[in-house]
Image (cartoon, rainbow, N blue to C red):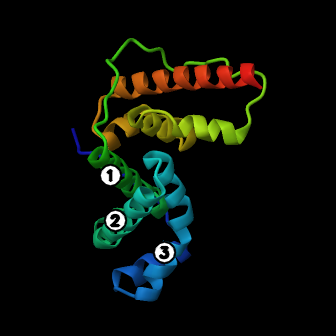
Amino acid sequence: MAAQQARIYQMIPEEVALLERCLKQDRLAQKELYDKYKDAMYTLCYRITNDFELAQDALQEAFVGVFRGLNKFRKQSSLGAWIKTIVVRTAYRKVKQQNQIFFEPIENIPDNVLLDWGEYIVPAYLERAIQSLPPGYRSVFVLVEVEGYSHKEVAEMLSISVGTSKSQLYHSKRQLQKKLRAWGENR
């Protein structure tokens, strides 16, 4: 059986030019790349770390990794998706260094668990509820429900099994449901 070739992502010309300039160690191009992605990536870091300073540290460390590894970018995804993967791994590693992350035991969790979130959710309260989740729950919830990664992708990024990713998502949704119901009853 012939080996399958990896799919090459078709980059837009502006992205190709920026990548080439960065590969030549053009500091202005590196700043442009950083400026283009820093806000979205900082938000992702914060959602994973739940700490402003730790998120900033993770962002800086991730971009150092981005610039050191640009020559390894294989164009199998967009440059932004590649950067996001590095950011997620870096932020998660920072959380692991700060806290011991415990994952719930794997259970037989059905895919696409739908929970009753109540009649109306205030976005600020939902954000606070998400941030109050334990680190393992929060990381998986953010990656699957907010960022749109599959359980397989999350498992690879966080070095956990697909079953553990599913279990963490299930438990995070259950905890969020309880928090939101309690908020609804107290308003």
Q: What SS does tag 1 mark?
A: helix
User: At x 39% / y 67%, what residue is drawn?
Assistant: 60
**165 sits left or right of 161 in the view:** right
Mark 1 Cα-neighbour bin, 10 Å: few <14, some 14–19, many ≥20: some
Q: Is residue 17 above or below residue 154?
A: below
Q: What SS does tag 3 mark?
A: helix
**Residue type marked 1:** Lys
Task: Give the spatial CA distance, label 1 vs label 3.
Answer: 23 Å
Mark 2 Cα-neighbour bin, 10 Å: few <14, some 14–19, many ≥20: some
Any part of residue 149 in sight: no
Q: Label 3 belongs to which residue?
A: 33
User: At x 74% / y 36%, what residue is drawn?
Assistant: 122
Residue reaching furthest to the front: 186
Q: Single out the mark in the foreground, 1 or 3.
A: 1
Q: Label 1 belongs to which residue?
A: 94
User: In front: 76, or 31?
Assistant: 31
Q: Label 2 belongs to which residue?
A: 61
Q: Is residue 111 above or below residue 49?
A: above
Q: Position of residue 161 (x, y in %)?
A: 30, 29
Q: Is residue 8 above or below residue 175?
A: below
Q: Position of residue 59 (x, y in %)?
A: 42, 63
Query: Which disc, if any, is residue 75?
Result: none
User: At x 34% / y 86%, what residue is drawn?
Assistant: 24
Task: Give the spatial CA distance, label 2 vs label 3.
Answer: 15 Å
Q: Position of residue 63 (x, y in %)?
A: 38, 68
**Which badge, 1 or 3, is on the more N-terminal residue?**
3
**Residue type marked 3:** Leu
Q: What SS does tag 2 mark?
A: helix
Q: Position of residue 129 (x, y in %)?
A: 58, 34
**Residue type marked 2:** Glu
Give the position of the N terminus as an image quadrant: top left
Pointers 2 and 1 in contact (C-beta within 8 Å)? yes
